[in-house]
Image: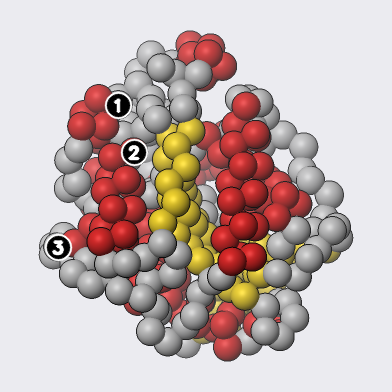
Amino acid sequence: MIHPDYERYLRTLPESVAHPSSLSTIARREEYRERALRQRGPLEEMADVRDGVLALDGRDLRYRLFVPLAEHGDALVVYLHGGSFVFGDLDTHEALCRRLARDTSMRFLAVDYRLAPEHPFPAAVDDAVEALRYVSAHVGEFAAEGTKLIAMGDSAGASLVAVAAATTRHDLQLAGQVLMYPTLGPEVMTDSSHRYASGYILEIDHLRYDYQQYLGDWTDHTDPRVTPLFANDLTGAPAAIVVVAECDPLRDEAIAYAGLLEHFGVRVEILEAEGMLHGFLRMGHVIPDALDIVDDVATHLRQYVASA
């Protein structure tokens, strides 16, 4: 059952949504950004917010570091934003990063990876993997030496985190990964992807279109970097928190990936948000109960870090 506040919100939206193929990428990014900034509400106060760049091989990636007022120094969270691999930036997810940094008393490092279609697969995956390795090797630039490292992302960003955590599981000792309503492949078909395919914020045919933009000429959808559900070995992957929304077309595939991690002996905790839709964690200004769930995710993350 959809949360009553979401029912009211959905009634304010147009009955039909233009297919993304009818709009330019620039127009879609501007619309997404404007909507995100309208919905984010007041920003949590931080002790420090600092922008910079990660100097990777052949490119620089922008980052924004959030230092909470009451910092415990337990961990540094590397955050990858959602946006169907096509849009989203440091501003669109700033409110969520600030809230999570406040709630966890941990520093958050949001990384602005390259977007499609200008930078098709595997650019974003490479950015996610190399960003984690860079931060791990230079953690003193962002937090105290020896600080634990967590990888966290939502939607497309969660897919990148899943791939990066699996890729680096033998050379980095991440304290955990947090996957919030991840998308886990362009052809995954589940009951939830049918039941909530249209009219529930995330239009599944729009996501399929964005996967085409993201993958470009890459045709092997069985590659686990494209579809993490096809991973044949996740032994040694970091402990995971998987957050799902009840009324999300991606719900079932996220639960399936949690099961795959457990199959390979990975500690997993699933947090399901009843009545919520895809992207709800950034909707606290419109759906007030969503903020309680953000706070709950932070509580579980603190517990994971304490036991890592």
Q: Are marks 1 and 2 in contact (CB under 8 Å)?
A: yes
Amino acid residing under circle 2 = Arg
Q: Which of these two is toward me, 283 or 203?
A: 283
Which residue is the site of mark 3? 222
Dot label at residue 251: 2
* Secondary-structure class at tag 3: loop
Residue 82 lies left or right of residue 163; in this view the side is right
Residue 170 lies left or right of residue 142; in this view the side is left
Q: Is residue 275 above or below residue 104?
A: above
Which quarter of the rendered picture does the N terminus lie within? Answer: top left
- Which residue: 59% across, 66% down? 307
Q: Is residue 275 above or below residue 77?
A: above
Percent coordinates x, y for residue 259 in the rendering? 28, 53
Q: Are marks 3 and 2 in contact (CB under 8 Å)?
A: no
* Secondary-structure class at tag 2: helix
**Residue 251 in view:** yes
**Residue 19 in view:** no
Which residue is the site of mark 1? 196
Q: Earlier in the sequence, mark 1 or mark 3?
A: 1
- Which residue: 79% across, 58% down? 68
Q: CA distance from mark 1 to mark 2?
A: 9 Å
* Secondary-structure class at tag 1: loop
Q: Which of these two is toward me, 73 or 111?
A: 73
Amino acid residing under circle 1 = Tyr
Q: Earlier in the sequence, mark 3 or mark 2?
A: 3
Percent coordinates x, y for residue 294 in the rendering? 61, 41
Say which quarter of the image contains residue 235.
Answer: bottom left
